[in-house]
Amino acid sequence: MLCLLVKINSAEGAIDDGGPTREYLRLLRKAIHDSNIFEGREGERQLSLDTQALQNKLYMWVGKMVAVCVIHGGVGPHFFSERLFLQICGKQTTPATVDEVGDHTFREQLIKIQQAATVQEANFAIGEAADSMRILGSLKYVSSIEQRDALVQSAAEYFLNGRLATALDQFRDGLKTLGLLDELRDNPDVFYSMFVADDPPLLAKDLSSLFKVDFSVQRSNDRKKENTTICYWRDWMIDTEEHLWDEFEQRLRQAFSTNISV
């Protein structure tokens, strides 16, 4: 079972500043994002299948957490894929694509089948993916390129939709908290930008352009210190973009959308 322990500094403002509420929502949202019930690329995340999480009703609890963030804080996840959002809202989704498959190994196996130039190559690739295809109930050798394409499509559809039906139902149950699910289904356009990441990625150069340095006079001691500081700042931005940018961008977006501290 998911446990979120929050320790609030007693000196932090509460009534006027909402400090404890902001900190709680920040931690709650981070716990949602880091939960193992999601998989896929940042900004396009789907539900993953975790049998232990199903047994412990983790999908329901995370759904409840999302509802609290949205209703009490006006803050959505901002990382759901469009498919997941439409599934939650009970809307029709577009046909599944191989690129949406969250499991890297299975995605590469499907791509190899899909790109096979002959039936013989396709069946060889199917044999290599036999264990994964068998689990999905999609193991079937083909006799034409059309059957190859249909097989890949059905496997992708089941991976993204069919096998997750129970997890999705449990997640929806959690979203019923505070009446959120009904509102999502009645007004999906209103909530779309709160759940789906539709913003372009933030780059280091974009963040740097927001700041204008008010330098001291040339050749002064203060100017030398300022030049050194700017160099450190730019080096830090470059290093962060190369290694930790996804996490840093997420924290920035959370801070500016919720007025919480980074």
Image (spheres, rainbow, N blue to C red):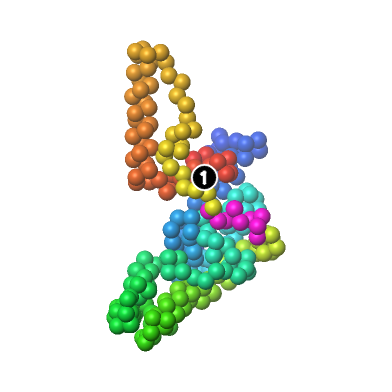
Image quarter for residue 118?
bottom left
Image quarter for residue 124?
bottom left
Percent position (x, y) of residue 35? 47, 59
Residue 245 belongs to magenta span: no
Answer yes or no: is residue 202 visible.
Answer: yes
Query: 252 left or right of 192?
Result: left
Look at 35% across and 22% down and name the residue there. Answer: 227
Percent position (x, y) of residue 70? 62, 53
Look at 48% across and 60% down and name the residue there. Answer: 45
- Badge 1 crowding class, 10 Å Cα cut-off, few under 14, some 14 to 19, many 20 or more, is some
Residue 195 belongs to magenta span: yes
Answer yes or no: is residue 8 visible.
Answer: no
Residue range (magenta): 188-197
The secondary structure type at the circle numbered 1 is helix
Q: Main secondary structure of the magenta part?
A: helix
Residue in the foreground of this view, choosing between 118 and 14: 118
Look at 46% across and 69% down and name the residue there. Answer: 97
Query: 48 left or right of 220?
Result: right
The amino acid at mark 1 is: Arg
Query: 5 left or right of 188?
Result: left
Q: Which residue is mark 1?
A: 253
Percent position (x, y) of residue 116? 33, 75
Location of residue 96 with respect to 43 vertically, above or below: below
Look at 52% across and 60% down and name the residue there. Answer: 81
Percent position (x, y) of residue 181? 65, 63
Residue in the foreground of this view, choosing between 52 and 33: 33
Location of residue 132 with respect to 173 vertically, above or below: below
Q: How many marks?
A: 1
